[in-house]
């Protein structure tokens, strides 16, 4: 099967959206499909897009000056899509939602190619800047409605997004599927605490609490820092590794200074993707918190990475987070925005080595069984075949 993948992600940046596109595409290639990805030219250059399998990526040149970047990708990708369709007609279009990028609607307006629309979030709750103004919000809503209407099947990482889409355009629930994020077991696997800390130059005896990811308001890292102020009383040498960067970093650093925790919280900054498993391995417990800033929880990729590395997880109670770790018995859930509850649960895990080991082993085993990118690609493949078969039957 020839799968044409369309996205507006910088594939040279190891962010959640770009990782999802690349990992699913690579897994589909490994399952025997031909995959062509159409994406904007990476700001870091084409070499930044690692291509360890036979994945064809067609880059669209974009103008990064002022507000021309979205428009340049729109027009450029329309031309590229037309060329790809003309030379090698795809069996399926896998369209990762990109607010305002409606090129597939024009290119496939008279084409019976099945369109799988993969929606990770509702753009009206995620767009920033000028796009939040009413005229642009109206355009985004209209574009989402048209794309949803044109799609042969809809996919999302969580059911709440599909519920939100229902408010924009009535859906055929039979054509809706939930396919969560996954993890690469060859990249994320259990490693020694001591060896990893030695390689990273961490000399404190610990214990270590870890977070790896972007610093955004919905990650609730201020709650983690406030909880650490309580944990320090029982574990005077505890260290918190906040690995990453983002819009809340300055405020988090200020909070650390205000609470007198500078000796206990380490900000390594953004690290190479290859080093992420080392920082996870250095941690005794990993944290993935969620603050209700939107109507859907999403599906945290870092959760699966923590579990693949055999680390117990403390997660905010609720769908996709605490509920997951409780069901898999690989961690504990905590009340949202509650430093006291978070500190209590961290203390329980940090004080019980055997409990941490058992939870870490269960998490790793669960991921190996059914939460890899290969498993996710198999689920997506079933959607493809059902869609193609259904269209042929209706013809």
Image (spheres, grey):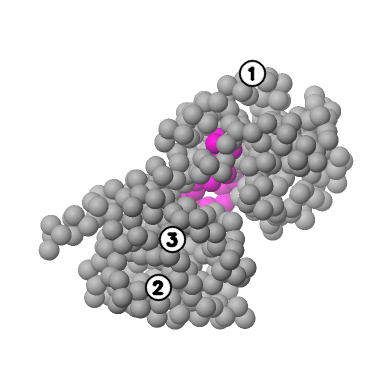
Nearest the eye: 380 or 89: 89
Front of the two marks 3 and 2: 3
Q: Which residue shows up at 44% across the image and 81% down it?
A: 75
Numbered tag placed on residue 55 in the rendering: 3
- Point out the tag, 1 or 2, that comes first from the N-terminus: 2
Give the secondary structure at mark 2.
Answer: loop
Viewed as shown, does residue 217 lie left or right of 81? right
What residue did someone put label 1 on? 354
Q: 66 above or below 352?
A: below
Residue 293 inside the magenta-drawn segment = yes
Give the secondary structure at mark 3.
Answer: loop
Q: Which residue shows up at 51% across the image and 40% down it?
A: 185
What is the span of residues highlighted in magenta in the rendered image?
A: 291-308
Q: CA distance from mark 1 to mark 2?
A: 52 Å
Q: Which residue shows up at 33% across the image and 69% down it?
A: 146
Report the number of discs: 3
Numbered tag placed on residue 102 in the rendering: 2
């Amino acid at each position: 099967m020839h799968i044409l993948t369309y996205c507006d992600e910088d594939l040279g940046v190891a962010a959640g959206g770009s990782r999802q596109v690349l990992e699913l595409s690579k897994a589909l290639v490994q399952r025997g499909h031909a995959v062509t990805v159409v994406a904007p030219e990476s700001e870091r250059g084409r070499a930044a897009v690692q291509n360890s399998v036979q994945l064809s990526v067609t880059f669209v040149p974009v103008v990064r000056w002022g507000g021309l970047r979205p428009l340049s990708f729109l027009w450029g990708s329309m031309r590229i899509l037309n060329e790809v369709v003309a030379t090698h007609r795809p069996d399926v279009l896998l369209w990762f939602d990109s607010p305002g990028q409606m090129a597939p609607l024009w290119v496939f307006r008279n084409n019976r190619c099945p369109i799988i629309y993969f929606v990770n979030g509702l753009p009206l709750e995620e767009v920033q800047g000028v796009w939040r103004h009413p005229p642009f919000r109206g355009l985004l809503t209209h574009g989402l409605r048209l794309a949803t209407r044109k799609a042969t099947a809809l996919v999302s990482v969580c059911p709440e997004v599909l519920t939100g889409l229902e408010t924009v355009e009535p859906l055929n629930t039979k054509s809706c599927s939930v396919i969560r994020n996954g993890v690469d077991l060859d990249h994320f696997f259990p490693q020694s605490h001591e060896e990893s800390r030695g390689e990273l130059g961490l000399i404190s005896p610990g214990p270590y609490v870890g977070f790896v990811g972007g610093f955004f308001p919905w990650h609730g890292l201020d709650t983690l820092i406030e909880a650490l102020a309580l944990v320090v009383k029982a574990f005077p040498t505890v260290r918190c590794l906040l690995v990453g960067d983002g819009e809340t970093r300055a405020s988090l650093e200020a909070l650390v200074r205000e609470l007198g925790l500078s000796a206990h919280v380490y900000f390594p900054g953004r690290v190479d993707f290859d080093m992420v498993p080392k920082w996870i391995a250095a941690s005794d417990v990993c944290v993935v918190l969620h603050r209700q800033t939107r109507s859907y929880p999403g599906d945290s990729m870092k959760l699966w990475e923590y579990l693949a590395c055999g680390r117990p997880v403390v997660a905010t109670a609720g769908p996709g987070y605490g509920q997951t770790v409780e069901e898999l018995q690989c961690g504990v859930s905590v009340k949202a925005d509650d430093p006291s509850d978070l500190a209590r649960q961290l203390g329980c895990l940090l004080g019980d080595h055997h409990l941490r080991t058992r939870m870490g082993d269960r998490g790793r085993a669960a991921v190996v069984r059914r939460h890899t990118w290969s498993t996710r690609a198999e689920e997506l493949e079933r959607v493809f075949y059902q869609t193609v078969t259904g269209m042929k039957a209706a013809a």
